[in-house]
């Protein structure tokens, strides 16, 4: 009987903890999904034609990945979703710095507005996916 009450106490304490493993996994899955979606398109279509639609893809994939990942956490789901989007954005910025010409070249290819709005939309989509998750 004592072990079951200890398990209940631990689960109550665990609900407030951030699950960094799930956050990082979600961010990695999100970035892989975005790369798998957009990089093949860029071989056939100029980036300036894709960029206006990239926001829809980043929001949608951020929503889906976050919605799926937050099922695994006990509490603070919206914060987890926000952090998934934020970590994915930081990963993307890091990848951009390794591109020829660095981050400035990537921003120039998208245009500053589309670049920053698109990355904000990734975070918004991830946060929204976590917000709209409803446990059954």
Image (cartoon, rainbow, N blue to C red):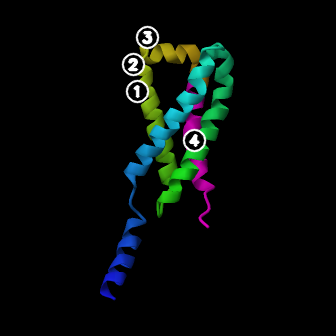
Cα–Cα span, label 2 and label 3: 8 Å
Q: Which residues are magenta?
A: 115-136
Residue carrying label 3:
101
Q: Is residue 23 above or below residue 136?
A: above
**Where is 104 relative to 119, above or below?**
above
The spot of residue 100 in percent (x, y) is: 43, 11
Outermost residue to the top? 101
Please indicate, yes or no, whether residue 86 appears anywhere in the rendered image: no
- CA–CA distance in space, label 4 to label 3: 27 Å
Q: Residue 79, percent across and down?
A: 49, 53
Numbered mark located on residue 94 in the image: 1
- Tell which of 22 and 103 is nearer to you: 22
Q: Residues within 10 Å of mark 2 (few under 14, many from 20)?
A: few
Mark 4 to mark 2: distance in Å? 23 Å
In the picture, which quadrant includes the C terminus?
Answer: bottom right
Q: Could you give the CA–CA distance between mark 2 and mark 1, rounded to whole angstroms? A: 7 Å
């Amino acid at each position: 009987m004592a072990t079951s009450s200890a398990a209940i106490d631990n689960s109550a304490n665990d609900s407030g903890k951030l699950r960094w493993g799930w956050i990082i996994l979600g961010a990695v899955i999100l970035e892989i999904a975005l790369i798998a979606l957009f990089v093949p398109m860029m071989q056939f279509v100029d980036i300036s034609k894709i960029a206006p639609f990239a926001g829809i893809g980043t929001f949608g994939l951020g929503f889906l990945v976050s919605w799926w990942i937050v099922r695994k956490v006990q509490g603070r789901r919206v914060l987890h979703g926000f952090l998934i989007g934020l970590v994915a954005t930081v990963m993307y910025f890091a990848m951009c710095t390794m591109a020829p010409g660095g981050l400035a070249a990537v921003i120039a290819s998208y245009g500053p507005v589309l670049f920053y709005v698109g990355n904000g939309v990734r975070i918004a989509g991830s946060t929204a996916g976590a917000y709209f998750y409803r446990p059954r």
